[in-house]
Image: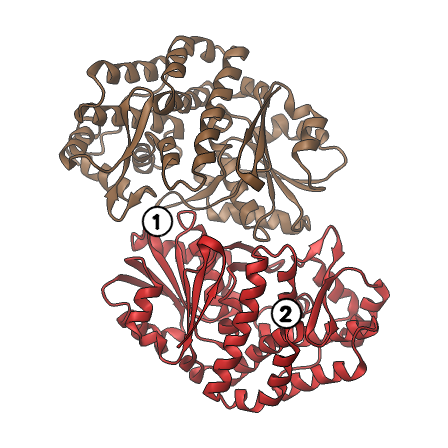
Chain colours: A brown, B red
Amino acid sequence: MQRLTIDLGDRSYPILIGPGLIDDRAVLAGAVEARDVLVVTNEVVGPLYLDRLVRALEGKRTASLLLPDGEQHKTLEVTGRIFDALVTARMNRDACVVALGGGVVGDISGFAAACYQRGVDFVQVPTTLLAQVDSSVGGKTGVNHPGGKNLIGAFHQPRAVVSDTATLSTLPVRELRAGLAEVIKYGLVADRGFLDWLDASLPALLALDPAALAHAIRRCCEIKAAIVAEDEREHGRRALLNLGHTFGHAIEAAAGYGEWLHGEAVGVGMLLAADLSHRLGWVGDADVDRVRDMLLRAGLRAEAPPIGASRALDLMGMDKKVLAGRIRLVLLESLGTGVVSGDYPAEALRSTLEAYFGRAQ
Amino acid sequence: MQRLTIDLGDRSYPILIGPGLIDDRAVLAGAVEARDVLVVTNEVVGPLYLDRLVRALEGKRTASLLLPDGEQHKTLEVTGRIFDALVTARMNRDACVVALGGGVVGDISGFAAACYQRGVDFVQVPTTLLAQVDSSVGGKTGVNHPGGKNLIGAFHQPRAVVSDTATLSTLPVRELRAGLAEVIKYGLVADRGFLDWLDASLPALLALDPAALAHAIRRCCEIKAAIVAEDEREHGRRALLNLGHTFGHAIEAAAGYGEWLHGEAVGVGMLLAADLSHRLGWVGDADVDRVRDMLLRAGLRAEAPPIGASRALDLMGMDKKVLAGRIRLVLLESLGTGVVSGDYPAEALRSTLEAYFGRAQ
């Protein structure tokens, strides 16, 4: 088992990574301090792992809730069902919400934990690669609104993250690939060496090689931990982790949540960011090609839906990363070095959008 | 105009108290830094003050939302309407939510501000005595759940509180009295001298004497400011401000929200706390009588509904102030000195509940 610590003063917490942790009573007893526990999962993950997790939480008073599966259920209404379950189980201020599943379960459960009684304990047990390398770390929680993704939420740090790498064996390959998009993201914004390792290790990761997976998850968490520790509330450097997300949100919003997986949209979004960075003269032609090539080799998409540049721009405008009307984007100074900038010609952005989303409406 | 500061480090904020502030452009320009503002009010307060407030917010981009009036609308569903309004008005991370109204508007608007984009600015413009002395100060926000009051919420400090004392002239007398219950609370838990002043000043306060009102509001805010500065997240001393609330919540829950005003229920709850403190030998008979007398002279109720002690206990059990199954209560060591304690004989609590709620179910 590997162990990292996210250093946030009195809200610091451990990330535990390894195969079989979901059955490890000692690990779970350390991660979940509360006596009363609500395990929130979904209809896909629950049948696979809920009984095992509850068994390993031996000695605690547990209740559980199965949510419907899918991003389209990450809503305020479904959050209400978690509150209902907490009240029905008579969970109090000293209860703990455990999220068993992917990013959707983690985001919505974390938001419910942040709001219930103005904040109860929260532990993440992520079962997707995406959640293990990204959404389970950092304390961002929230739900979608018809007007945009994650428009409603809270910063609420977990007490612990327990990443059982063996659960990836039941993950659909499409979701594994979507998770790889976020893994590539860490390399692109923060670590050229890791990017090179990834480039060589994509086949091993796609084949679920345990050592490769463990290394990738650990390195992503380390990078995220360092960035989050510096900038918990995303006033500055943390925004780097949003590489590809502003473009990606436009893709997801246009397609309707659920059509594209988040990581798939982020993958294409990273390609647009590379393209715009190229137009600014920061990265070369070959760098853009390399990003596209890695996406394709990871089995990801490299084309945006033909919704037109104007609609894409409009959908980007409602994103959280807008500052007083100006769209700040995460761009690449070079492969391995991200930068947050609103300082680019509007025409360059327009050209990138037209190149990928098309001119016509 | 009087000015206090709630000292919370980088989340410190001013409380401004005085007649006519709602029309004061300079005061509002200082309180509301954001350019984009959503004013949330209700169907009763809106027609009286919304236009004036919006006029005084000259130069900003404003939108407004009228919520239905009443505690029964302090729900997650109605919070969703605030999110809808924020999205429709294309409000971003740098927007500000201004709450114009009483405690319900303040609590729900503050909760929406806490969650929208994971937290936007929030300014309180309280128009009830209760909100001016209590709910607008301290950063507690939230909504009710059928299972209990304020079970869903967040700690989210306002950027400023603007208390226009002239707005109390349009407040129904029943609400003025309910506000006085909270004023009396501050005297009971923290300031015997203020309690004595109140005892003598009740007629002046009920007659809306401006000087008496200003003094009472200021002193309550000072007391609350001192306590909140010590204990923002209610791990200890802040719980003193809940005098009467655990009993009061049971009354409100039994009657259905809306039947009793919050302050009315808290008033009776304080009487129960005094009664239990008397049974513990901490305060005398005459002290309990004095609390009852002040409530009656303030035009408040001094009797609980006859729901039976068992049901009352049950309703108290779901309250947020429960710690690992034990009901911690705010009691009185003496008039003017509150104490949070779970260290009392269960029989004493039972006797108090039976004396006020009755034995029968």
- Residue B192 seen: yes
Chain identifier of the residue bearing label 1 in the image: B
Determine whether, in the image, residue B352 is placed left or right of residue B5.
right
Quick one: label 1, few (<14), some, or many (20+) residues within 10 Å? many
| Closer-to-camera residue (A360/A351) | A351
Spatial separation of the CA atoms under disc 2 and disc 1: 36 Å
Q: In x, y percent, where is residue B330?
A: 70, 66
Write the residue at 62% across / 61% down.
Answer: B238
Quick one: label 2, few (<14), some, or many (20+) residues within 10 Å? many
| Closer-to-camera residue (A317/A346) | A346
Give the quarter of the image for residue B299: bottom right
- Residue B44 seen: no
Q: In x, y percent, where is residue B348?
A: 84, 68
**Disc 2 target residue:** B252
SS for callout 2: helix
Image quadrant occupied by the N terminus of chain B: bottom left
Image quadrant occupied by the C terminus of chain B: bottom right
SS for callout 1: loop
Determine whether, in the image, residue A214 is placed left or right of residue A291.
right
Q: What residue type is labelled 1?
A: Arg
**Disc 1 target residue:** B93
Q: What residue type is labelled 2?
A: Glu
Determine whether, in the image, residue A80 is placed left or right of residue B238.
left
Determine whether, in the image, residue A28 is placed left or right of residue A341.
right
Q: In x, y percent, where is residue A65?
A: 61, 40
Give the quarter of the image for residue B159: bottom left
Chain identifier of the residue bearing label 2 in the image: B
Give the label on residue A272, or none.
Answer: none
Q: In this view, does A252 lie above or below B211?
A: above
Of labels 2 and 1, the one closer to you: 1
